Amino acid sequence: MKPTISFVLQLSPATAYENLEAVARNLLDGLDVLLNSGLVKCSVFMDGPTLKMLRKVAKPLAFGKIRNGIREGILEFLGGGFYDPMLPLFPEETQSQQLDQHRDILKKYFDIEPQGYFNSSFVWEMGMTAVLEKSGFDYALVSEAAIQATVGRSTPVSGWFTVEDRGTLMRVVPVADSLTEAIEKDDLRWRVIAESYCHGGKSAVVVLDLPAQASEIVAFFERLVDFVETNDVQTWPVGYLVNQLPPEGSLSYLMSAGRKLGLPSSAMTCRETLVRRPEINLFQKSFLNLYRRGHDKLAGKDFTEFCDALLPAMSPMFFRDLANEEGMRSLKVREWGFRYLVSASSTLDSLMKFNGLRIEVCDYLLQGRKQIWVENPDMSLLLDYHAGGVLRSFYHKDSAVNLLNAWRDDAEPTFGFLDCLLPNADMTAQQIEQALSMREYLLRDPYEYRIKRLDSGAEIELLEEQGFAVGTKRGVFHVDKKFTLNPSTSEIVADYQLGNSTYMDSRCFFGSIFEFGLMGETGGRIVVDGFDMKWDGKNPLVYPEANKLEIHDYGTKCTVTMSFVKPAAVFIGAIFGASSSAAPELFQGVRVYPFWRTALSVADEMNFKITVSVSKG
Amino acid sequence: MRADLIDIQVEDHGDDVEITLSGSLGSYQLAAVREKIEMLADGPGCFIFVNLEHAHFKVGDYLDLFLELLNKLQAKDSKLILIFKNEEQEAYFAKYRNIFEIYESREAYKDSGLSKQLLQIGVHYGSKTGIRLSPSVAIALSLLIVGWAITLFLIIAAQGRDIADKQAQIVALQSQKDRYVHEIERLETSIGPLRKLGVIEDTTMLTSFGVIQDWVSYLEFLENSRREK
């Protein structure tokens, strides 16, 4: 039997986007190979930035040739999101915006309107049916596993099905997962596997990732042509399959958590990534917050300009729990993602002519409890008063960076101003590092908040009794934690007042943990009281009496300065995450812990003050 | 604490403070809303805008809260302006429509008249600084200041004119001097050949050291004058 395969070619998640020009040049050459051979009829999906780059680097007549290929049915361009986002994570308006933007660019460059919807993550939720129908799609590619789960079978599924939701209809075409895997891995049994999909004249859809490196793309296309020619495979674009074959039946429900997202197989939806990874959740909520604010306050050209700055943050890369520059486990990807968000925030400020100070008490993270969002034209921060008055994010707008951007493998968020008491014992830097990374001895009880507006800005006062346990010793401190902010600088002054509320003396070390996502690939340096620490980026150290600590990050070109009214001992250590080899060797950020010896007798009080400021340069 | 059910936002722009309440507000939230609103309104700011566009009041008790807030703000000479444009809120506040100042947006209030805003700023800062002026005194003071300004301007203008006259005179004298110098040069040129022939004695070179150009000439001059004696 001659197998019929519908190849779908897509960019690999690991595509070298920094070198997109080279990727585009090679893609054009590869498509040229495909069109010259005339043997392989396939579907292609490229996101908006790649299409734009393709147009930029195309030689004369290259696009004409592609258009001709499309007319002859050799090539089919699939539609999707401009930045290929996972649609269920975003508001419906942004979903439509992305789809329409991609559709417009295909119309402009190739004079076609895409018939099929493709998403490289293969995420599907029923709500997408209406959005896709509204955007004019006839069919959508989904993962085979999702359809198998719906129809309750484990045998191969091919052909196409229909799903309907709220009166809208969509044709769904399953991708032959096992055949894709076999062809990708050059498994010689691929023909046997193909037969199980292609019985009854049906076509199997095989999705192949183009090589991530530009230099390998042309060779890939040559191999594909060679494969089809050698094995006498009949090929169709997916659209042809949908138009020519009858439906296999209707599905009452379809749900797919997607693939290559770093989610466990038990995950039912892509939103699992938000639950499992606080960094991704924070990123998505920051996106939503910005979008809603922009949507409320802007209109017309201003809104379009704002969306142009914001929508790149919908790229799937920023929602995957993967390392190696494919997902948010990579510090570089996180920096990249937050650069889009913080730049969009600056754009919004300038379009709204925002000045002054904005304080918002809302459920920012959509977790059923409130946080305090503070913003001025220079910075913004999220203060979680329920979790011990910690900072969840700290954006410096000038440098377009989120400073609290480290990553913890235990799926705990990274914090700033996380208060911690260490026992009154002789501890080495390694022991302190262990205690801090295990998050022991923390003061993390909820606070009551008070906001005071002042002539020079505002003061957020957090007041509460904080229980602690250091070894066998238990106690309660009355903590008054006051953050002073002003409308025009990126500076936070944290004023602590600790009172011993128990009937016994308390001796310990009190300090505050900061987990900065700084000093990544491009490195940086740490200066304490003007003295360059020449820190190796690995081994922890403690500087005994510091008045001022500076962290210079060469990548983001920003400097964080922490100054202490009362000289503090400062712990500096690295945060590492696990890589694919399971060893914790991926650098994820810098942990800083300024601390003071506190010997509090009954009803004694102590004051500490930390000023954190950020500047560019 | 029921404060957790409130979405509240404050934007501080110096004199303008906008407090935004959103969400569904029932009896349970009343105490918390009161506490938070009073906390946020209790600070600097001349115009306190309370944006209620996205708030949904389930009970009528919030009217009393806003009336109390209005009283408190009036006591400290700040102004309360309610911001909304939906019919639900129109109906909710209909009873006190003539008491509250209600506008569609902050910008709409700003466009509604400059004089009342200036007056409000005057009243606010008057109470803040302790300097209270009656309108007539304020007008008199303004006139005095304007008068001073005009006088100053006139003095500067007069001095400017004087300086311009003097400059014109200087220019005229300078050109006159140039003319004279030119004339002298012309005369010297005309008598030059006669002087060379010795017909005319150049008196300008006899009476002073004007002809002495260097030390050698000076010493010769001294020697000659000694010999002559």
Image: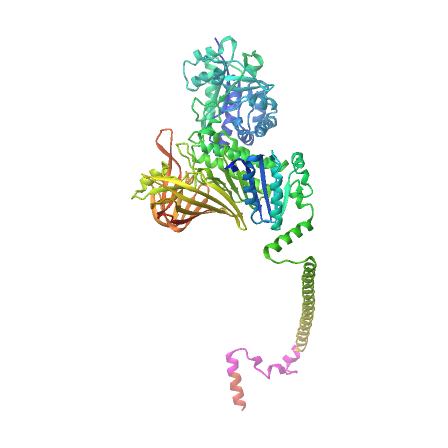
Predominant secondary structure in magenta?
Answer: helix
| Up/down of A231 relative to A49, above or below | above
Residue A384 falls inside the magenta stretch: no
Q: Position of residue A66 (x, y in %)?
A: 56, 23
Q: Position of residue B182 (x, y in %)?
A: 67, 72
Q: Residue furthest left?
A: A426
| Up/down of A476 relative to A198, above or below | below
Left or right, A553 with respect to B128, comes to left
Left or right, B104 with respect to A274, comes to right
Q: Position of residue A300 (x, y in %)?
A: 64, 36
Q: Position of residue A514 (x, y in %)?
A: 41, 41
Residue B194 falls inside the magenta stretch: yes
Left or right, A11 with respect to B64, comes to left
How many marks do you count on the picture?
Answer: 0
Quarter of the figure with residue B35: top right
Q: Nearer the viewer, residue B89 or A521?
A: B89
| Up/down of A144 relative to A526, above or below | above
Left or right, A292 with respect to A263, comes to right
Q: Nearer the viewer, residue A38 or A582?
A: A582
| Quarter containing the C terminus of chain B | bottom right
Quarter of the figure with residue B8: top right
The colour style of the image is: rainbow
Q: Is residue A320 visible?
A: no
Q: Is residue B210 visible?
A: yes
Give the residues in magenta: B192-219
